[in-house]
């Protein structure tokens, strides 16, 4: 049977969205009447076509059945442990306790500075703080788990009673195990749960929510001529296969987030294709996380006006992703992004 993919497109916001839904001219995205769409793009090998949602009934039986399954995933209300999706995107603030991360390496090695930045991220509107002790920037070398743990344990201990959600950015299962003595609400493993064969079993035992992250290769080699047959459908198929593995291992909950991994084994063309078509991943039925903050593609798109902070590119990307219904944005400096999103919503919702 020929496989098809469905991408929601042509979005509406606020009162216009609600009016379209009432008139049955559009469908709600993720059960949210403030955001809807009236077109889908149907994709298969060597085929792309956009149609209005009210024309789906005229498709052939095989295609219509596949599209309707996807539409069910796209339109259903998402639920996630300790989070509400009434206001999206949800900001995940980055706290790198490393000497060599690509953006802020070395800035927060001292516990006092790390805690100060932790509080700044919360004050700036982050509902999740993603804490990591190992750099996974392109070309970075792996470090021992003992060193990684030594960088993060003091901060985790101090913040264990805080009411914000704490995400642990690690691919090492022994670091995950040690961290469970403190407050951990989410596991963010950039290896796609592939680094350690025991990770999935750990996630099953603890019942912790987690991110399925896409990466081609590993941090040391991932940017050496990455290749895909079709970057969008290859990553989509990767997520589908990984979800099947997770289910077969006995993990039944839906507290799962999908991250297509901008810059993790992708060149500029790959990154742009993912970002422009990010809404294809809604049809898998899980919330989407994108980490585009300060990434290399921003500088590659406009070398003349590149800057170290890349606020402009981060903000414009964040607004675009919000317009596509992306639920989570992983960012380094939240205040500017939050301000931009607030103004955008006031103008559109």
Image: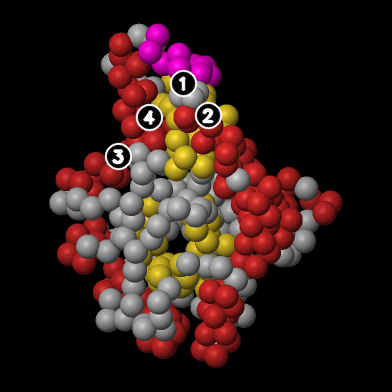
Q: Which residue is disc 4 drawn over?
A: 71
Q: Are marks 3 and 4 in contact (CB under 8 Å)?
A: no
* Disc 4 versus disc 2: nearer the observer: 2
Q: Which residue is disc 2 drawn over?
A: 20
Q: CA distance from mark 3 to mark 1?
A: 28 Å
**Residue 178 x %, y %:** 29, 79
Query: Residue 194 or 235: which is nearer the viewer?
Result: 235
Q: Are marks 4 and 2 in contact (CB under 8 Å)?
A: no
Mark 1 falls on what kind of element?
helix
* Disc 3 versus disc 2: nearer the observer: 2
Q: Are marks 3 and 1 in contact (CB under 8 Å)?
A: no
| Residue stretch in magenta | 47-58
* Disc 1 versus disc 2: nearer the observer: 2
Q: Residue at x 61, y 66 (%)?
A: 334
Q: CA distance from mark 3 to mark 4?
A: 20 Å
Mark 3 falls on what kind of element?
helix
Q: Which residue is disc 3 drawn over?
A: 241
Disc ID at residue 327: none
Q: Are marks 1 and 2 in contact (CB under 8 Å)?
A: no
Q: Earlier in the sequence, mark 1 or mark 4?
A: 1
Query: Residue 155 or 31: which is nearer the viewer?
Result: 31
Q: Which residue is disc 1 drawn over?
A: 53
* Disc 3 versus disc 4: nearer the observer: 4
Q: Residues within 10 Å of mark 2 (few under 14, many from 20)?
A: many
Mark 2 falls on what kind of element?
helix
* Disc 3 versus disc 1: nearer the observer: 1
Which quarter of the figure has residue 99?
bottom right
Q: Are marks 1 and 4 in contact (CB under 8 Å)?
A: yes
**211 sits left or right of 250 in the view:** right
Q: Earlier in the sequence, mark 3 or mark 1?
A: 1
**Residue 303 x %, y %:** 79, 50
**Residue 338 x %, y %:** 62, 62
């Amino acid at each position: 049977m020929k496989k098809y993919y469905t991408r929601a497109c042509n979005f509406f916001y606020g009162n216009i969205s609600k009016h379209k839904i009432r008139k049955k001219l559009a469908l709600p995205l993720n059960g949210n009447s403030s955001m809807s769409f009236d077109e889908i793009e149907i994709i298969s090998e060597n085929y792309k076509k956009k149609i209005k949602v009210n024309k789906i009934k005229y498709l052939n039986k095989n295609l219509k059945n596949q599209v309707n399954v996807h539409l069910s995933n796209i339109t259903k209300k998402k639920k996630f442990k300790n989070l509400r999706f009434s206001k999206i995107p949800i900001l995940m603030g980055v706290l790198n306790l490393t000497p060599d991360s690509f953006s802020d390496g070395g800035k927060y090695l001292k516990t006092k500075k790390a805690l100060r930045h932790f509080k700044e991220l919360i004050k700036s509107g982050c509902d999740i703080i993603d804490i990591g002790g190992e750099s996974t920037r392109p070309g970075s070398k792996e470090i021992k788990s003992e060193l990684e743990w030594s960088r993060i344990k003091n901060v985790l201990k101090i913040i264990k009673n805080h009411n914000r959600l704490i995400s642990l950015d690690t691919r090492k299962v022994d670091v995950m195990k040690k961290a469970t003595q403190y407050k951990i609400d989410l596991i963010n493993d950039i290896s796609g749960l592939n680094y350690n064969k025991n990770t999935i079993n750990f996630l099953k035992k603890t019942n912790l929510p987690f991110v399925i992250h896409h990466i081609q290769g590993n941090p040391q080699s991932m940017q050496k001529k990455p290749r895909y047959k079709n970057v969008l459908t290859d990553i989509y198929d990767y997520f589908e296969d990984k979800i099947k593995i997770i289910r077969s291992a006995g993990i039944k909950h839906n507290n799962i987030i999908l991250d297509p991994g901008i810059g993790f084994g992708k060149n500029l063309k790959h990154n742009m294709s993912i970002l422009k078509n990010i809404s294809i991943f809604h049809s898998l039925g899980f919330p989407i996380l994108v980490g585009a903050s300060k990434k290399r593609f921003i500088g590659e798109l406009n070398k003349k006006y590149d800057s170290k902070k890349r606020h402009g590119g981060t903000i414009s990307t964040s607004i675009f992703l919000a317009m596509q219904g992306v639920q989570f944005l992983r960012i380094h400096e939240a205040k500017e992004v939050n301000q931009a999103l607030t103004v955008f919503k006031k103008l559109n919702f």
